[in-house]
Image (tube, rainbow, N blue to C red):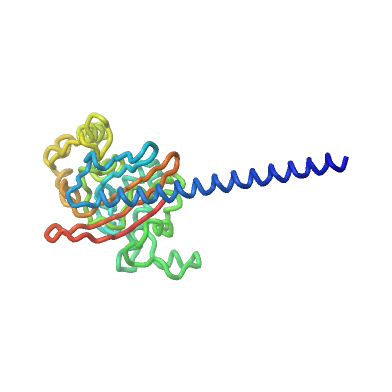
Amino acid sequence: MLMIWAVLLMSITVMGVVEYVRSSAEEAKLAAYEFRALHLAESGLAVGMHPNTRRGDLVLKQQIGPESGFDVVINYEGARIPINYATDERLREAIYNLFIFWQLDAESAAIAADSLADWIDNDKSPRANGAEADYYQQLGIYDAPRNQGFVRVDEMLLVRGMEAVDRRKPDWREYFSIYGEGQIDLRTVFKDVLLAVTGASESDVNRFITERDGADGIPGTEDDRRIRDEEAYQLLGLSGDKLNAIRGIVNDDDTSLRRITSIGWVGTKRAKIIVVTRRNAETGALTYLGRMEE
């Protein structure tokens, strides 16, 4: 009996050791995959930031080995609403329209839009539906509003009314930029933002995006079509006063601010790096404005 128990105990010990070794080996393998995926994402960034690389270039998607590679997407920061320019009445109205499109009620949309503008302006007078220091002090908050531009998109959650936006549209951060320079780029603008800024019908916006993104329907690929502003206005059904009202905040040639998203992959492991850069048109010098890893 003692021998049987000894054999059983030894068997259990051996199986435990084997399982521990197997688990350790699997963890080491996954860690190696994660490191390799991050390295490939960095390699993709180097390709995406090269001054001669353009949106849709085949070199942006590469398979390296049987189960690894990187995918890079180049966008321009003008695809998003430049939140630090929300004091421009045209952009503030666009923000309001965007919240309405996301199915907020009119009162909630107005509170959030006006309060965002009050947060970054330099005065102490609240807009009709906005919030200045008195409102926040009633909540026990004595350092708001900041009366300066947002330094992170997440900071917008501190603003009156943004909790309603967050509940209705959890991915709202994708539609705003702290780096934008006050204009919307027609080449890459998101559908929701284009609807909000132009006031065009949804059918006209869909027609424009279909023409712009090409047969595959994916922006930033080789079949995209460059649509100049006058043709874009025609496709969007914009003319007269409606067109004149937005001419100063839309363009088709904002090439200085790039948002480069690089995803490295090894097997099922993914590593994503996003960088925002500005390139000087005259010298070619590159400035890093932001970096995010996921």
**Residue 261 place in picture, x, y as percent:** 32, 48
The furthest residue to the top = 215
- Determine which quarter of the picture holds residue 289: bottom left
Tell me if 134 is positioned left or right of 53 in this view: right
Q: Is residue 220 or residue 177 the one in the foreground?
A: 220
Q: Is residue 21 or residue 95 the one in the foreground?
A: 21
The furthest residue to the front = 3
Task: Residue at 39% x, 50% y: name it.
Answer: 38
Vertical order, 135 against 48 (above or below): below
**Residue 31 place in picture, x, y as percent:** 48, 49
- Determine which quarter of the picture holds residue 179: bottom left
**Residue 239 place in picture, x, y as percent:** 14, 40
- The answer to whether one can see residue 278 in this image is yes
Task: Residue at 44% x, 64% y: name it.
Answer: 135
Task: Residue at 54% x, 44% y: name it.
Answer: 26
Tell me if 153 is positioned left or right of 229 in this view: right
Q: Is residue 51 or residue 291 the one in the foreground?
A: 51
The furthest residue to the bottom = 142
- The answer to whether one can see residue 107 in this image is no
- Determine which quarter of the picture holds residue 181: bottom left
- Looking at the figure, which quarter contains the N terminus? top right
**Residue 11 place in picture, x, y as percent:** 74, 41
How many marks the image carries: the answer is: 0
